[in-house]
Image (cartoon, coloured by chain):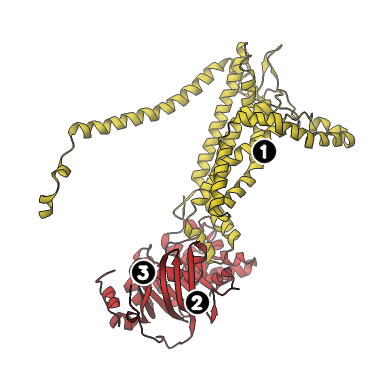
Amino acid sequence: MQENQTANPELKRPLSIIYRWLGDRIFLTVTVALGSSIILLALSMAFVLYSESSTTWQEFGIIGFLRGTTWDAGLHLKFGALPFLFGTLITSLVSLAIAFFPAVAIAIFMAEYSPRWLSGIIENLVQMIAAIPSVVIGIWGIFVFAPWMRETFYLPVFTWTADHYPSLLPVLGNPIGYGITTATIILALMIIPYITALTNDAIRQVPKEQREAAWALGATRWEVIRMAVLPYARGGIMAGAMLSLGRAVGETMAVAMLIGNKNTLPFSIIGPASTMPSVIINEFREAVENLHLSSLMAIALSLFVISLIVNLIAAYITRKLSITGGQLV
Amino acid sequence: MLSQEEIVKTDGPSNGSPLVRMESKDLTVKYGQVTGVKNISLPIYNESVTALIGPSGCGKTTFLRALNRMHDLTRSAVITGEVLLDGYNIYGPKVNPVTIRRKIGMVFQKPTPFPTMSIFNNVVAGLKLVGINNRKLLNEVCEKALRQAALFEEVKDRLTDPGGSLSGGQQQRLSIARALAIEPEVILMDEPTSSLDPQSSSKIEDLIHELKKNYAIVIVTHNMQQAGRVSDNTGFFYLGELVEFGETGKIFTNPVNKRTEEYLTGKFG
């Protein structure tokens, strides 16, 4: 009682009704408005893509367009997306396969082995690489990496194949330096930082108790990682891989600059090819025909859907594999 | 700080089995400048339970973790003094901490099954580490360890389920079974029941009673009734020092040190 009497009266002052009543509602309105505008934006984008591409869907049908192998904007005005679907699928999946293990290894080294000062440096470097604009990587690829690949690998391999198995030359493709292999390797380099960063986060979230439990069983350092750390972090690692796959699917500039841009199947191993983003960026300026433009829109819509699916899979994996409080969810 | 005179030891094992399994000698653990525990000398008798009690932050867990070299994982931790296991110093220059941890099992405050591993694989995880893959042997060890941990009947039909699918109390018994499977010489328990409900706690206590027939057990506990129920010897820690050590009955009924008495009667803690 005594304490109440000596208490500062300011602390007891009732909040103004307007502040309490209005504050809550304004906050609610603003958040709901902003939150729903994001959803509306995505929906309206999908709708615009669909309506702009409707001519293509009517002309070729959904299956027909996606399975069509001809992309002829000149004479016949015949459009099929299969080469680009194929190119996107190959470059993104192979680049993920190339990038995954090195990236996870870097993350394990950072989180578990390296001294703190070194992992700080690596972390910054990784972030820096992730922040390089893809057009910069693309121009480096054009002037440095692609010529180097041509001189060091493609030409020797090509000459050797020409000497020994000339029948395989069409499978190998032209050694011009710009092609599907070059683009895939660059893409792998570009997604390594993402997988590394996300894996590193996932590993650092593994509770100390899990590691100690493995230590207490007499596990060595690597055994602790294999037994306690990686299984626990698997959800985060797989989600990171899927999100990076999403980036690889949508990566445009560097790929368009390096892949050689060939619109017809079949693609060869080192020869030029195309992806969905690369054909859009290369042709949208010259698309004067209605059907051409509409087909590019159709490809954009397909890319939109594919990215959405990849992200949904990532979210599903995260939910399915993640572990909270020692309990499987 | 406690003066030297305040540290009293009543000596002698309580259960007539004088074999000292482990012994710490002048053990000091420092984290950088901060002292965790100071000059602890304490025997751990075979086939008995040694309880470590004391208020929060008194160093009992720090001491426990020094007994199987868990502090090796903390970069800033510096340890001086000796811990003898069957007469050999586990902090000796040629000792491999991995081998030590296999001889001194540990059960933690929170249940720590590997959540994605099956129950079976959780139990035999320590055996698989050293390359034991004989299915028949693993099956035998698994069943024996689960029986010892009083969990077998509850999980025998679902050994392939993930460890994370069990309840908290079951997970803790699984952790105990996992520690038992590698047949350690000593079992360290760091507040093994503090995150469990009373029923699960009492199961764990019964288990400790059973296990002490074969093992030396050290248990850190906040629960003084528990210390009284399960232990043969009790060490009272205060401010990083071992204030009193002796037979549990004596410490609880007739403590020599004033602080021990105050703590046990709830005057602080």
Secondary structure of the residue carrying numbered label 1: helix
Is B152 rendered above or below residue A38? Answer: below
Provide the chain ID for the residue under circle 3.
B
| Number of residues whose C-alpha sits closer than 10 Å to that of mark 1, classed few (under 14), some (14–19) or many (20 or more) | some
C-alpha span from label 1 to label 3: 56 Å
Q: Which residue is mark 1?
A: A94
Residue type at mark 1: give it. Answer: Val
| Residue at the front extreme, as displayed | B33
Q: To which quarter of the image does residue A240 belong? A: top right
The chain letter of the yellow chain reads: A
Q: Which residue is mark 3?
A: B58
User: Mark on residue B82?
Assistant: 2
- In the image: residue B21, left or right of residue B57: right
What residue is drawn where x is 74% and y is 29%? A267
Viewer-closest of B244 and B108: B244
C-alpha span from label 1 to label 2: 55 Å
Label pair 1/2, CB-CB below 8 angstroms: no
The reply to whether residue A85 is in sight is no
Residue type at mark 3: give it. Answer: Cys
Coordinates of residue B9 in the picture (x, y in percent): 37, 83
Secondary structure of the residue carrying numbered label 3: loop
Viewer-closest of B59 and B104: B59
Q: Disc 1 or disc 3, which is closer to the eye?
A: 3
- In the image: residue B12, left or right of residue A320: left
Secondary structure of the residue carrying numbered label 2: strand
Q: Disc 1 or disc 2, which is closer to the eye?
A: 2
Coordinates of residue A44 in the picture (x, y in percent): 46, 22
What residue is drawn where x is 49% and y is 53%? A206
Coordinates of residue A117 in the picture (x, y in percent): 54, 51
